Amino acid sequence: MRDAVDIRAVELGEYIVKNNATVRAAAKAFSVSKSTVHIDVTKRLCYVDPTLYEKVRTVLDVNKAQRHIRGGLATKEKYKNASDT
């Protein structure tokens, strides 16, 4: 059981780095919860593959710094589409 969790953590980490993905996107791609992805790539991955962990951490830090911008654009688009109907 433990090996499967470690393998999933590495697969999630590789997916995030390869696709520059958010936690939400990785969760959707692997059909797991956002909490599971977050725990796997922040807590488990550092023990399993420290090099990959550093790469994932970089991507997640960039995503965190940009999320207020993406949220603002999503809200703008929502109200733009609402006024079109």
Image (cartoon, helix red, strand yellow):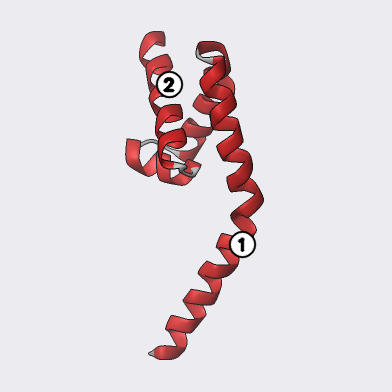
Query: Mark 2 = which residue?
Result: 10
Residue 36: where, in percent of width, then height? 47, 31
Residue 24: where, in percent of width, then height? 46, 45
In the displayed structure, 5 sits above or below 62; it is above
In the image: residue 14, left or right of residue 75? left
**Nearer to me, 71 or 33:** 71
Give the amino acid at mark 1: Ile
Residue drawn where x is 43% and y is 82% of the image: 81
Give the amino acid at mark 2: Val
In the displayed structure, 78 sits above or below 16; it is below
Element type at marker 1? helix
**Nearer to me, 10 or 85:** 10
Q: Quadrant of the C terminus?
A: bottom left
Query: Mark 1 = which residue?
Result: 69
Residue drawn where x is 55% and y is 18% of the image: 51
Residue drawn where x is 60% and y is 54% of the image: 67
Report crowding for label 1: few under 14, some 14 to 19, many 20 or more residues within 10 A (C-alpha). few
Residue 5: where, in percent of width, then height? 41, 17
Report crowding for label 2: few under 14, some 14 to 19, many 20 or more residues within 10 A (C-alpha). many
